[in-house]
Image: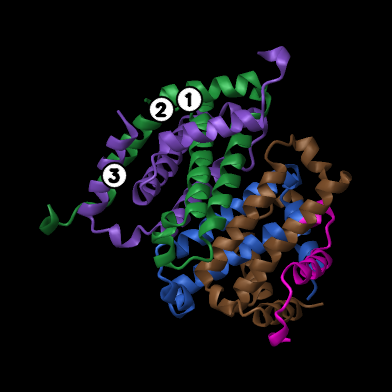
Chain colours: A brown, B blue, C green, D purple
Amino acid sequence: MTIASLQLQYRQFVAERDWEQFHSPKNLVMALTGEVGELTEIFQWLTQEESAAVMADEGRATAVRDELADVFAYLIRLADVLDVDLERAFTEKMTKNARKYPVKPDRV
Amino acid sequence: MTIASLQLQYRQFVAERDWEQFHSPKNLVMALTGEVGELTEIFQWLTQEESAAVMADEGRATAVRDELADVFAYLIRLADVLDVDLERAFTEKMTKNARKYPVKPDRV
Amino acid sequence: MTIASLQLQYRQFVAERDWEQFHSPKNLVMALTGEVGELTEIFQWLTQEESAAVMADEGRATAVRDELADVFAYLIRLADVLDVDLERAFTEKMTKNARKYPVKPDRV
Amino acid sequence: MTIASLQLQYRQFVAERDWEQFHSPKNLVMALTGEVGELTEIFQWLTQEESAAVMADEGRATAVRDELADVFAYLIRLADVLDVDLERAFTEKMTKNARKYPVKPDRV
């Protein structure tokens, strides 16, 4: 599946519920913050080791999947509303990052 | 392009720089927070109307694309490290959401 | 009441529950993020006008007070753990800000 | 110094720059998010041990103090705009928390 097809699916979900009126870029950025906050609450008291093993716990694993899905949903919705091609933005940012953080010669 | 192929690209970028040691789930959740914070800073003083027109300003548009890319990058990296299938998590969450927020009969 | 006395009160609350083990600066920063996320969820779909009138709604007013208290609690706890004097840090930052954003002559 | 006096100081700072127009509760919640994001960026790649020793590094210590001050500034500004008494909200929340998380008998 492409990101565009997931965006279309979510766009229809929003339209059927008449929620476009709430989905300004500003509001969606806040909604993204709220979901990242919920994701953070799962991890805040965990040690690094516990965080690495978080998916071994059935209840936590479901919570993590749900929160990752919520963050992803608002992110692709925000990109859709702003008409930003997420894949292209990612590829261009990776090119910038590769210049900013060059690989050390002995690692190439 | 699939999300899996973008994850593979980022995984190689991280490996070449020997950054796996920093990419625990806990740390990546914090990195995601940092990027959402930067995205938020673009929108915080904008009115709803200005937020809707944010891509009309060349400088802001580039900043928005860069920050969306950074949020997306850490999100797919986190999903990769946790071995979560983002598309599947999204689809399953949408099914839950559809039950939680049913469409009103007159809108079907 | 001084911030120091509130910090002492919270320090005792934490000690009585044997929670010091969880209160590393890193974890407290994440806890702060989680609470700001909950505060954000109250405001995310509100218009500017609705956000300005949020305390007129009894239920929302209680939620806002609770979330502000949670953000404040983790902030003073974090400052306590790091041995940072919040009032002094605030005053010094205000001095920096005053230099960075000078008042226009016609407004003095 | 009381929180009320710090709020008054910040209120004057804002008024002198004609910034009240930007300081809706919704916008201030976003500004708070942005500052917590900057605070998070200091801690995101640190181990728990490094986070506990963060103030030993001169540069990081200044950054931490500045970001704590920024979070505190927007928090007391938000409380001021909403007419919420932060100390009272804190005390009331602590009472709720004490009921929610009772101290185990052997610790009293």
Residue at screen point 51% across, 46% down = D36
Residue with the mark numbered 3: D10
Q: Is residue C90 above or below residue B18?
A: above
- Residues behind callouts 2 and 3 on a single chain: no
Residue C3 image label: 2
- Which region of the structure is painted magenta? B79-108
Q: Does the CB distance between marks 2 and 1 fall below 8 Å?
A: yes
Q: Secondary structure at mark 1?
A: helix
Mark 3 belongs to chain: D
Asked whether, in this view, residue D91 is left or right of residue D21, the answer is right
Look at mark 1 in the image and give the residue it sits on: C7
Query: Could you tell me which residue is drawn at 38 percent across and 39 percent down?
Result: D85
Q: Is residue A84 visible?
A: no
Marks 2/1: CA–CA distance:
6 Å
Instruction: Tell me the crowding category of disc 2: few under 14, some 14 to 19, or many 20 or more residues within 10 angstroms, Cα based.
Output: some
State how far apart marks 2 and 3 are (Cα): 17 Å
Which is nearer the eye, B73 or D87?
Answer: D87
Magenta: main secondary structure equals helix
Quarter-of-image position of residue D99: top right
Q: Are marks 2 and 1 on the same chain?
A: yes
